[in-house]
Amino acid sequence: MIASAPASPPHRDADGPRVRSRRGPSASLQASVLALNRNFTAVQVISAKRAFCLIYKELAEVVHVENNQFCSYDFSGWLELCQLKLEMGEKADHEDWIQAVNFEIQVPRVIRLTSYDRIPQSTVKFNRRNIFLRDGHRCQYCGKRYSTPRLSLDHVMPKSRGGGETWENIVCACLKCNVQKGGRTPAEAGMKLLNKPVKPKRSPLLVRQLTLRKYECWQHFLPQSSE
Ligand SMILES: [Zn+2]
């Protein structure tokens, strides 16, 4: 249901509500929001800031999951529900809230783009960040975890021998293992891969986010995956 709109919310302007996170500008406003198309199919993950702009401009509505039922709210309706929740003292630890000049509002976890009906592409972007995420920032030779600056990309079959830039041929490796392996195959270098590299079916970032309680309601809108 779309909640009926009460009186205009305070402090609206052309760019959307002036909101600020209590935990600093980069905390709650950077929380992730799952955007659905108008047919409730997941399209992409966006920031809370962008989600609020879309809701405010009436290009999207909040989809709130309550007791396995979905309820839709426009900006005013969502604000009203948030005020009610505050009055009842029902804020939970896993929720993100944003403090505006004179009101407080919860970051929705899911929004629906009301006039967008395209089906998203399901391909996962092949890039450095996603390879590191797929491999859990773990060197695929020694098995140790490292921060991003201490990791490199290794061509399992060396580039000089025709190894391609593909999900199946590139793994995360620490600098030491990468140097040790050099321009050889793992077998030639006497090194063993921890896992067989494969193309992920789902965005590695999404897979990681789904393990967090705050994003578990996204499961309702995502196709089942074996990952
Ligand atoms: Zn290593």
Image (cartoon, grey):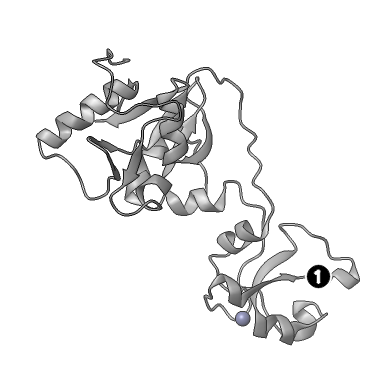
Q: Position of residue 52 (x, y in %)?
A: 41, 33
User: Residue beneath label 1, please?
Assistant: 157
Residue appearing at x 34%, y 24% in the figure:
75
Residue appearing at x 18%, y 31% in the figure:
83
Q: Which quarter of the picture shows residue 107?
A: top left
Q: Position of residue 162 (x, y in %)?
A: 89, 66
Q: Which residue reaches farthest left?
A: 88
Relative depth, front residue between 65 and 103: 103
Horizontally, residue 178 falls left or right of residue 112, namely: right
Would residue 71 be seen by someone viewing this image from the given angle? Answer: no
Which amino acid type is shown beneath numbered disc 1?
Met
Residue appearing at x 35%, y 21% in the figure:
74
Relative depth, front residue between 32 and 75: 75
Q: Position of residue 96 (x, y in %)?
A: 30, 45
**Is the CB atom of the residue marked by disc 1 within 8 angstroms of ligand 1's nearest atom?**
no
Name the quarter showing ligand 1: bottom right
Q: Position of residue 53 (x, y in %)?
A: 44, 31
Horizontally, residue 29 falls left or right of residue 59, namely: left
Q: Which quarter of the picture shows residue 164?
A: bottom right
Residue 6, relative to residue 62: is it above or below? Answer: above
Residue 41, relative to residue 107: is it above or below? Answer: above
Secondary structure category for the residue under label 1? loop
Relative depth, front residue between 152 and 161: 152
Relative depth, front residue between 123 and 26: 26
Residue 200, relative to residue 56: is it above or below? Answer: below
Horizontally, residue 60 falls left or right of residue 153, namely: left
Q: Which quarter of the picture shows residue 58?
A: top left
Residue 137, relative to residue 82: is it above or below? Answer: below
Could you tell me which quadrant the N terminus lies in? top left
